[in-house]
Amino acid sequence: MPGLTVSSAQRPVADTSDDRIFTTRSAVIVLDGASAYAPIPVSPSTYADSLGRHLHDHLDHDMSIDLADASPMRSPRPPPNWT
């Protein structure tokens, strides 16, 4: 499989934004860290970070896995910090 080269940019910069971009050997994951409809104890950036890392780890480990199967709702391993 040929390599995947990705260039990305975001505004505002990642340190001040809730949006996140992750890349794997075969995928690009772009998450909009939008606020929840109801108040929750997790910030949008924490949620996007945890979900993005979880998806990245699963998709990078097994490039044949479907995105739906990499979902934290289906995965045998819960994402970190989701307790």
Image (cartoon, rainbow, N blue to C red):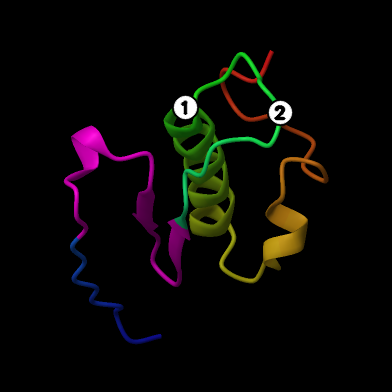
Left or right: residue 37 versus residue 3 is right
Residue at (72%, 50%) from the top-left corner?
Answer: 71
Residue at (37%, 54%) from the top-left corner?
Answer: 22
Looking at the image, is 41 positioned above or below residue 14? above
Whether the magenta-drawn stretch holds residue 48 is answered as no
**Label 2 sits on residue:** 38
Looking at the image, is 73 positioned above or below residue 31? above
Residue at (62%, 30%) from the top-left corner?
Answer: 79
Q: Quadrant of residue 4?
A: bottom left
| Secondary structure under the numbered disc 1 in the rendered image | helix
Left or right: residue 61 versus residue 36 is left
Looking at the image, is 8 positioned above or below residue 83? below
User: Of the residues shown, which amino acid type is indicated by label 2?
Assistant: Ala
User: Of the residues shown, which amino acid type is indicated by label 1?
Assistant: Thr
Q: Which residues are magenta?
A: 10-30
Pick whichever, 43 or 48, lies toward us. Answer: 43
Whether the magenta-drawn stretch holds residue 20 is answered as yes
Q: Position of residue 23 (x, y in %)?
A: 36, 60
Residue at (45%, 69%) from the top-left corner?
Answer: 27
Of callouts 1 and 2, which one flags the residue occurring earlier in the amino acid sequence? 2
| Secondary structure under the numbered disc 2 in the rendered image | loop
Residue 46, labelled with which disc? 1
Q: Position of residue 10 (x, y in %)?
A: 21, 58
Left or right: residue 29 versus residue 6 is right
Figure quadrant of the N terminus? bottom left
Left or right: residue 4 versus residue 62 is left
Q: Quadrant of residue 51?
A: top right
